[in-house]
Amino acid sequence: MYGLVQPVVGARLLVRDREVLVAALVPALFLAAFCAAVAILDGRGHALRTFYTTFAVLAPLPSVLFAHHYARLAVLGRRKLGFGPAEPCLESLRRMLGRAIKQSILIALALAPVLGLVRIVPILGNPVAQVASAAWALHWIVVDAFDSARFLRPGQTLAELDAHAEHLQSPWYVRGLRTAAEATPIGKGILNRFARLCDRLSMPWREEIALVEEHPSLMLGFALSTAALLAIPVLNLLFRPIVLIGAAHVLGQLEATEPDSPVLPPPAS
């Protein structure tokens, strides 16, 4: 239930605070303009369908263009919600592009072996694969929300955040691939190499994925509320800033109640 209301917290702050609302509208208007342009150029007479199809495809992917804007919005949201001092987590363009490419490959690749096996099951294979694909995309929307809500403590550096992530365990799907490799009599080496590749690609999001694992019921509620938000026309164009502020609120609460949590960024030395 606590997870379910977090996007509501984000939406309420947008409605009540003009500064936050203006900051949230900037990327939303650009996203709407891009989806509208794709729908107009499509020319097949299904403009509204094309608009929301484009929106759905872009939803789980990171936003390089507005990454710095969202980083500042996350810090603004923390301040408006009454949490401690923080600095925006600003990355170089090269680093952002690298992360975006890795995440796009990971979203498309990591679940491919499982989906391939599921689809060969008669009758139920394709529907189950579609549900799994949707859940996988939603998982990454939640991970991306918490990634966008990252912050630096005063004096902290990106290098310190990277060092912290290296000490966290591999993501659940990497461990699942390794377990499957051990149980597979054929192709064990190929599956292990695939798991190592997914692990390397996942390094930038180890902290966020660990957070999802450590608080599964909270994150399930957060994901379900986000899915409902994505289904509401017009309002769903603001889904990214809404869930970002909701994620910032969760991080602030966890920081206050679980200061020693292994998935929270450590204080600067």
Image (cartoon, rainbow, N blue to C red):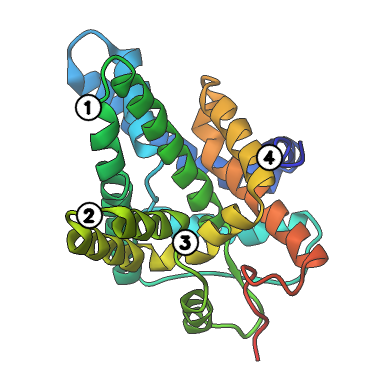
Give the mark, 2 or 1, whose residue is nearer the N terminus. 1
**Furthest-front residue in view?**
185
Q: In which quadrant of the rendered view does residue 119 lie?
A: top left
Q: Which residue is mark 3?
A: 68
Q: State the CA–CA distance, disc 1 to disc 4.
A: 46 Å
Check residue 14 in the rendering and tell me which mark sits there, or answer none.
4
Q: Secondary structure at mark 3?
A: helix
Q: Secondary structure at mark 4?
A: helix
For badge 2, the amino acid type reads Pro
Check residue 120 in the rendering and tell me which mark sits there, or answer none.
1
For badge 4, the amino acid type reads Leu
**Furthest-bottom residue in view?**
269
> Image point 81% across, 59% down: which residue?
82
Q: In which quadrant of the rendered view does residue 12 lie?
A: top right
Q: Which residue is mark 2?
A: 185
The answer to the question of whether label 4 and label 3 lie on touching residues, with beta carbons closer than 8 A, is no
Q: Secondary structure at mark 2?
A: loop
Query: Dot 3 surroundings within 10 Å: few (below 14), some, or many (20 or more)?
Result: some
Q: State the CA–CA distance, disc 4 to disc 3.
A: 19 Å
**Furthest-top residue in view?**
45
| Residue 217: x %, y % from top left | 68, 43
